Amino acid sequence: MDQDKTMGMRRGTNLPRMGDFNQSVILEAIRRAPAGLSRIELADATGLSAQTVTNITRRLLDDELIAEAGRAINGPGKPRVILRLVAESRYSIGVHLDPAVITLVLLDLSGAVVRRRVMRTPAKEPQLIVQTMAQAIEKLIAESGVDREAIAGVGVAAPGPLDAAKGTVIDPPKLDGWHRVPLRAALSEATGFGVTLEKDTTAAAVGELWTGQGPPEESFLFVYLGTGIGAALVRAGDPIRGSSRNFGEVGHIIVDPDGPSCACGARGCVEVVCTPQAIVEQAERAGVFAEGDPAGVEERFTLLCERAAEGGDAALAVLRRCAGHLTVLVAALANVLDVDRVVLGGPFWSRLEPVYLREIPDALHARSATRAVHTLPVDGTVVGDDVGAVGAACVVLDSVLTPRAADLYLED
Amino acid sequence: MDQDKTMGMRRGTNLPRMGDFNQSVILEAIRRAPAGLSRIELADATGLSAQTVTNITRRLLDDELIAEAGRAINGPGKPRVILRLVAESRYSIGVHLDPAVITLVLLDLSGAVVRRRVMRTPAKEPQLIVQTMAQAIEKLIAESGVDREAIAGVGVAAPGPLDAAKGTVIDPPKLDGWHRVPLRAALSEATGFGVTLEKDTTAAAVGELWTGQGPPEESFLFVYLGTGIGAALVRAGDPIRGSSRNFGEVGHIIVDPDGPSCACGARGCVEVVCTPQAIVEQAERAGVFAEGDPAGVEERFTLLCERAAEGGDAALAVLRRCAGHLTVLVAALANVLDVDRVVLGGPFWSRLEPVYLREIPDALHARSATRAVHTLPVDGTVVGDDVGAVGAACVVLDSVLTPRAADLYLED
């Protein structure tokens, strides 16, 4: 047979695939209803027949992923048994590798943080950092008292670009010696867990998706404010990862034609205008800092935000101008991607939030190509500064739990 | 029952949905194999059982969408019956509304152009333009001799932004009096056909997808060079349309910090640097034109490209600089979207192709955020200057024929 003729064609589906898919749909529906759902409500929510719902929930009860949790009386007829997620039936671990700190979280199946650890990123060679991470994971598990067997895996969020096929981090900024480090394999070997490597920006968006509880069909752009700036897109409940899982590299989009030169040859790129380091440099030129102020970027960034909050005119002017530049980026991305909503987050977000949420929404509306068709709400993340680590753990839960129509295709 | 609790949840699937989906998968596999496929090859390509393939192909034969077309002998055993698409079993019509010209095409089910008409866009009020379009559609059908009953519908490609829910064109550039024109309803009423309204850029990408015959899992960025510049994204065989079907508005991305001021308040936006009008203005400043040259933008644009092809230094320098600016845009989009490949096309593409395909690929590689992970090939469209109209017709065929996993979901 001529294999070339049929290579890469779309696959059909069959009954066992359909059964697995419907099981994920039921479990997701229960997970998304904190108060639980009855079997009749599940049939209504999913469109599945009462018989199918009964069969699937029996399997989920047997696996102890869900439990019966009381009865609800709704009008006449028999009281209905309410089914709830057993949050403590499965767990996952998220690790966020940042140039400055490593954050670790243990989540339960509901997405709640059970335990958290933060450590300075040691100034060591990659292999030793991986060992330190593995030890921190063991401590996290021991402290939580969770059964190791109940942990579905470890998700690692790292700065891009990544080589997803090889599980390597290519050249993370400010981590000397990190060139093509096989992080996934090394951490898997050191811990014995399956490890998923994800871009920090995509992980953060998955964290928002899981924690935010917005409608599953909603699309949103997540703009990640970390040591670098990145973007992620969620559409119909799925992050869009791109062909090499490197979606959202925005560092060289021009946002200020009058901005400083960039190593790429252009002027006023995101990287030299919108990052914490660039913002601190602008504050230095504006005379925000005095002798005796700390010299580190992180400390100066915090100080700048504090001075703006206290009403310092120079500090506030710097942050307002930076908000304007970030708006140029957000508008460019939102106009390309045509989303329902914009979410801002990442480790530096909470300090910027008071000024940025005042400045960005109106300026963005004025620049929106679709303002005649729909509004474009802007929100801060609901996850907080740990969104990278929480998101990395959610990536693991997501791959286990979320129904994907594409999973229906028969395998090659 | 508490409807709010379950609103917007993901839907399950069932047997009838699965059957429809598998039928689309089989038909797509046959469509994508111009030499036809045997039932055994179909089972192999789709992963479906021999019995399922036999049942589905029987239905498709009864509907005359496919036909038996001879026998193939492959090694020992019975010769296999080859099944081919009946290209003349269904047709669709595509209309591209451009400020200057209206292009109409009639495609058969294989995506081949059966008949084509081009007319100047009349300087009339919208309602009269719609009447002119409807008359042109009737002439196209009459000339082709195709049975009206075999036409699946009409696709219209128009400049964005669109209000897809209402089927209206909001404010197409250079079409005076076109404000919120209900194009979809008006053309449907005038012709009696179902009408699909699509952004010109998205339509062009669908045309490329159908005609290009690339692997279905490939993702590509389509950069559309028309009176305006736009972008579209195809991923796993589907165009990404955005939340209001307005994906790909790129006009105000900054590509030249030293460029002219833009009405948006910034400097060097795509709209004032990369459009045909902007390119002609740059050529005027560079002294490419002499007295006696025609004054219109379209004619001057053609003349500029001809002079560059003849080796005119000033003309070539203008186009090379413009290629550099377009590369900044393409790099920004490719780095955000992380695609396998870039395709350039649209009504102005063929004139730019000789210079742009020489200039852009290397410059893009240097700016690619994922150059350490994968190459980023750049190609011109395979569809030609009619890509908008062909694409609009393909949008209709695509909605009828292409299997979508999302179609498996049970309806609300």
Image (spheres, coloured by chain):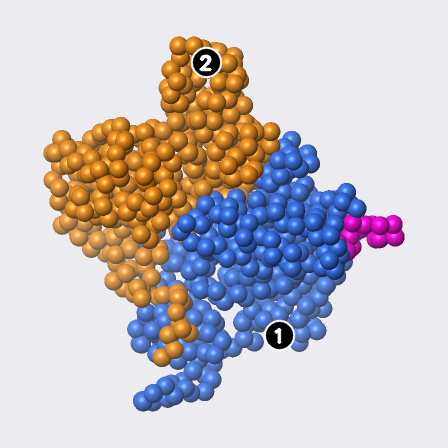
Chain colours: A blue, B orange
Q: Chain of mark 2?
A: B
At horizontal 60% and vertical 40% (from top left) the residue drawn is: A255
Question: Can I make out residue B305 in this image?
Answer: yes
SS label for mark 1: loop
Is disc 1 surrounded by few (<14), some (14 to 19) or many (20+) residues within 10 Å?
few
Image x and y of residue A315, in percent: 73, 51
Residue at x 18%, y 47% (from the top left corner)? B189
Residue A96 visible in this rendered orientation of the protein? no
Give the magenta part as a residue range.
A288-304
Q: Whole-percent x and y of residue A394?
A: 56, 63
Q: Quadrant of residue B380?
A: top left
Q: The numbered mark 1 sits on a residue in which chain?
A: A
Is B109 drawn above or below residue A231 in the view shown? above
Q: Nearer the viewer, mark 1 or mark 2?
A: 2
| Amino acid type of the residue tagged 1 in the rendering | Asp
In the image, residue B68 above or below residue B344? below
Q: Is B410 contained in the magenta span? A: no
As helix, strand or loop, the secondary structure at mark 2 comes to loop
Instruction: Please tell me whether residue B377 is drawn above or below residue B54 in the rendered image.
Output: above
Q: Residues within 10 Å of mark 2 (few under 14, many from 20)?
A: some
Q: Amino acid at mark 2?
A: Phe
**What's the mark number on residue B289?**
2
Which numbered circle lies on residue A147? 1
Which residue is rendered at x = 22% and y = 37% of the image? Answer: B128
**Residue B163 place in picture, x, y as percent:** 35, 49
Q: Of the numbered discs in the image, which one, if any, rests on residue A170? A: none
Picture residue at 69% right of the left edge, 36% below the top: A260
Q: Position of residue A35 (x, y in %)?
A: 47, 79
